[in-house]
Image (spheres, helix red, strand yellow):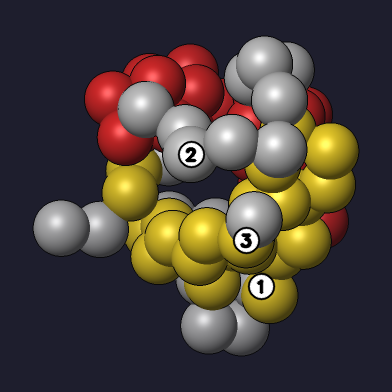
Amino acid sequence: MQTTYSVTGMTCAHCVNAVSEELGRLEGVSDVQVDLPTGAVTVTSDRPLDPEAVRAAVDEAGYAVAA
C-alpha cells in the first residue's frame, strides 16, 4: 500500500536522505519516494502505518508532517 504525506522544512538532498532513512526504518516500509519541490513523501508499506510512528520518524529527521 502507498500513503503520501506532506512534509515541511525540506530544502535539499540531505533533507530527502534524512527523511527517507528515518521512514525506511519503520517496520513494513519497503520504499520511500520524496518529491522535494512539493514536499510530498510517498511511503510504500506492506500494511497501514501508525500515523504517530510516521510523525515521530519525520520529527527524528528534523522535519514535520503537515497537518
Mark 2 neighbour density, 10 Å: few (under 14) some (14–19) many (20 or more):
few
Q: Is residue 50 above or below residue 33?
A: above
Sequence-wise, the earlier of marks 2 and 3 is: 3
Split into 4 quadrants, where in the image is the C terminus? bottom left
* Amino acid marked by disc 2: Pro
Q: Nearer the viewer, residue 47 or 58?
A: 47
Image coordinates of residue 21 in percent, x first then y, are: 77, 29
Which residue is found at the position 37% from the left and 27% from the top?
50
Mark 1 neighbour density, 10 Å: few (under 14) some (14–19) many (20 or more): some
Q: Residue at coordinates 53% horizontally, 83% vertically from top-left?
A: 38
Distance of label 3 from label 1 (alpha carbons): 18 Å
Q: According to the image, label 3 marks what residue?
A: 2
Compare residues 52 and 49 and report the one nearer the observer.
49
- Residue 37 vertical position relative to residue 23 in the rendered view, above or below: below
Mark 1: which secondary structure? loop
How crowded is the residue under tag 3: few (<14 C-alpha within 10 Å), some, or many (20+)? some
Q: Answer with mark 3 or mark 1, whichever residue precedes in sequence.
A: 3
Label annotation for residue 48 = 2
> Does residue 3 appear in the picture of this structure?
yes
Q: Which mark is residue 36?
A: 1
Q: Dots 2 and 1: beta carbons under 8 Å? A: no
Query: Of tags 2 and 1, which is closer to the observer?
Result: 2
Q: Is residue 50 left or right of residue 46?
A: left
SS for dot 2: loop
Spot occupied by residue 1 in the image (x, y as percentages of width and height): 64, 56
Q: Is residue 59 visible?
A: no
Instruction: Name which of mark 2 and mark 1 comes first in the sequence.
Output: 1
